[in-house]
């Protein structure tokens, strides 16, 4: 996907239209990024309104991630072949429709279905944004500016989602309560569609191979087979067939990778490049990504539930509390790459340590907050963990993708992003199970979050250990340029609380 050909000559596009197109696509991407965090704040209210079970709440979050992961890995090749504008607008329209259905849901099953569709729609949009930027911005300087604006906007999306989720749920506009967090996407989707039709140019790759739909279906089924038992096991009593399902899912992913490696098709795009795992830096980085996403998503799901259900925080108060994490990330983000260029993998180890230390501090603060109390005891830990996220994840993307062969850049970024989403879904399932198991045996929500914290700390500590397997040397400018060649480089900020 590195070789890209525009449908119409980009030299005919005015500078003003290039930036209008970029603005429209960033707005569309923001719907997805804000939705990552806006829903967590609304979950306790959804639980009361729909009578959702603990497992169904986990599905509301992990269903979105699974669908995103399953569709993302094939959506990039679909955009290359059929037109990136077409895929982007399809995703935006479907996302708006799914958001409307989510807001109208009468029960948890309907909401989960709408969330799965939302995740798939978001995955249709995501890879088209940066791929289009690479075509329409022919100047390296302008392209860098566009990427910087994109990164900055998505960098604050998690904080916007947390605040917006709290405000909309608390305000109870028109009696919509939590439903407003989904309805807000509808007008944004309509604006994106109308404006996108007018200003976004169509681009495609003339040499793009046919998407591997059969492989994508197998990959999606395998990921569901891995996550389903982890989500449903507590409720079903962990029968043996659930563990067989997990084994089947792992074998499905492995089999797909091996089959593509042994018999690479010249007609269909590759989904999983197993040869990438032979690159030590890529394999280690993939492990860091999975461990990070699992610990991150799992802990902050339970964190939101503890604040609102256990400590009786309002959605707004809970959202504002969690913004402290985003502030830490925002403050550390500008120095993450420069420090990594100077000190190499030690900065990633430092970031993992800061995340682990931050969660330890939050865990220690739990007894000092109390019912309806002040969130300030948890703020230092949240800020520290947020800063750790920036130091770990932002350089990680560049380090890992730079380690992949240039010819496999697109495949590497697809695998990397899919691993992130799958890791997040697994983390929600595992840490959610630990949390609700504690509640089921009579522990308070405060005690439950304290049982979850060591698992999150262990996940971040594992990130630090695996980071030591990355290259010792500092990240060079050449490495960053090599990483930047990927047409659908994953977004390091898709990790909001």
Image (cartoon, rainbow, N blue to C red):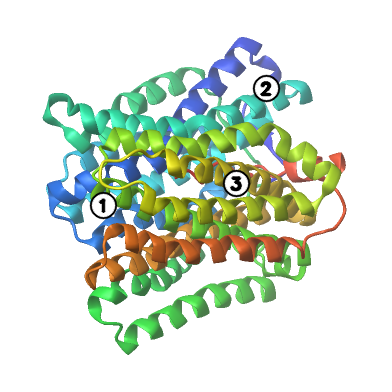
Mark number, residue 37: none
Name the quarter where the C terminus is drawn. Answer: top left
Locate residue 312 relative to residue 407 in the image: left or right: left
Residue furthest to the bottom in view is 240
Question: Can residue 475 be seen at all in this image of the molecule?
Answer: no
- Mark 2 or mark 1, which has the lower sequence index? 2
Residue 310 - label = 1
Category of crowding for the residue at label 2, using alpha-carbon neighbours closer than 10 angstroms: few (below 14), some (14–19), many (at least 20): some
Secondary structure under the numbered disc 1 in the rendered image: helix
Tell me the crowding category of disc 3: few under 14, some 14 to 19, or many 20 or more residues within 10 angstroms, Cα based. Answer: many
- Label 3 sits on a secondary structure element that is helix
Q: How far apart are marks 3 and 1 (CA)?
A: 26 Å
Residue 42 appears in which quarter of the rendering? Answer: top left
Of residues 466 and 186, which is closer to you in this image? Answer: 466
Depth check, front residue: 271 or 123: 123
Q: In the figure, is residue 73 to the left or right of 261?
A: left
- Measuring from the top left, give residue 203's x and y in whole percent: 59, 32
Find residue 316 and report its horizontal and vertical position in percent.
30, 33
228 above or below 49?
below
Which residue lies under the disc numbered 3?
389
- Disc 2 and disc 3: Cα gap in Å? 37 Å
Indicate which label's residue lies in the foreground, 2 or 1. 1
Whichever of labels 2 and 3 marks the residue nearer the N terminus, that label is: 2
For image coordinates 46% across by 82% down, the residue present is: 247
Q: Which of marks 3 and 1 is nearer the N terminus?
A: 1
Q: State the residue in front, 202 or 375.
A: 375
Task: Please give the label number shown on residue 10.
Answer: 2
Left of 399 or right of it: where is 52? left
Which is more foreground, mark 3 or mark 1? 1
- Give left or right: position of 458 versus 37: right
> In the rendered image of this protein, does residue 324 appear above or below residue 293?
above
Q: Which residue is drawn at 38% across and 49% down?
A: 368
């Amino acid at each position: 996907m590195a070789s890209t050909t525009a449908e119409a000559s980009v030299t005919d596009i005015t500078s003003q239209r290039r930036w209008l197109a970029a603005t429209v696509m960033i707005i569309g991407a923001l719907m997805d990024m804000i939705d990552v965090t806006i829903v967590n704040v609304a979950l306790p209210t959804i639980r009361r309104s729909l009578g959702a079970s603990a497992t169904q709440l986990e599905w509301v979050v992990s269903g979105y991630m699974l669908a995103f992961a399953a569709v993302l890995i094939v959506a990039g090749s679909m955009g290359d072949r059929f037109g990136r504008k077409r895929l982007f607008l399809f995703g935006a329209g479907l996302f708006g429709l799914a958001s409307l259905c989510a807001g109208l849901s009468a029960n948890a099953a309907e909401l989960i279905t709408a969330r799965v569709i939302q995740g798939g729609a978001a995955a249709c949009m995501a890879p088209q944004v940066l791929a289009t930027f690479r075509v329409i911005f022919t100047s390296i300087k302008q392209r860098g500016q566009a990427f910087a604006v994109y990164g900055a906007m998505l960098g604050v999306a998690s904080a916007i989602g947390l605040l917006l989720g709290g405000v909309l749920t608390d305000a109870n506009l028109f009696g919509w309560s939590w439903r407003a967090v989904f309805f807000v996407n509808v007008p944004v989707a309509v604006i994106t569609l109308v404006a996108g039709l007018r200003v976004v140019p169509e681009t495609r790759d003339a040499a793009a191979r046919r998407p591997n739909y059969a492989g994508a279906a197998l990959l999606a089924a395998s990921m569901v087979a891995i996550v389903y038992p982890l989500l449903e096991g507590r409720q079903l009593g962990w029968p043996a067939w659930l563990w067989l399902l997990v084994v089947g899912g792992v074998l499905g992913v492995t089999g797909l990778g091996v089959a593509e490696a042994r018999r690479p098709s010249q007609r269909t795009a590759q989904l999983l490049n197993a040869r990438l795992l032979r690159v030590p830096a890529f394999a280690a980085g993939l492990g860091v990504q999975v461990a990070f996403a699992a610990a991150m998503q799992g802990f902050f799901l339970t964190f939101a539930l503890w604040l609102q259900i256990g400590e009786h925080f309002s959605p707004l108060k809970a959202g504002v509390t969690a913004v402290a994490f985003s502030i830490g990330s925002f403050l550390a983000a500008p120095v993450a790459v420069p420090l990594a260029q100077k000190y190499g993998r030690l900065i990633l180890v430092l970031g993992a340590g800061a995340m682990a230390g931050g969660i330890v501090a939050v865990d220690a603060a739990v007894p000092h907050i109390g019912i309806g109390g002040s969130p300030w005891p948890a703020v230092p830990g949240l800020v520290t963990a947020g800063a750790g996220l920036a130091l770990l994840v932002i350089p990680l993307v560049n380090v890992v993708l730079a380690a992949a062969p240039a010819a496999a850049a697109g495949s590497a970024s697809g695998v990397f992003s899919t691993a992130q989403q799958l890791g997040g879904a697994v983390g929600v399932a595992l840490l959610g199970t630990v949390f609700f198991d504690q509640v089921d045996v009579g522990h308070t929500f405060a005690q439950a979050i304290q049982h979850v914290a060591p698992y999150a700390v262990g996940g971040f500590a594992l990130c630090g250990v695996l980071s030591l397997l990355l290259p010792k040397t500092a990240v060079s400018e050449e490495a960053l340029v090599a990483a930047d060649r990927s047409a659908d480089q994953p977004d390091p900020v898709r990790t909001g609380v």
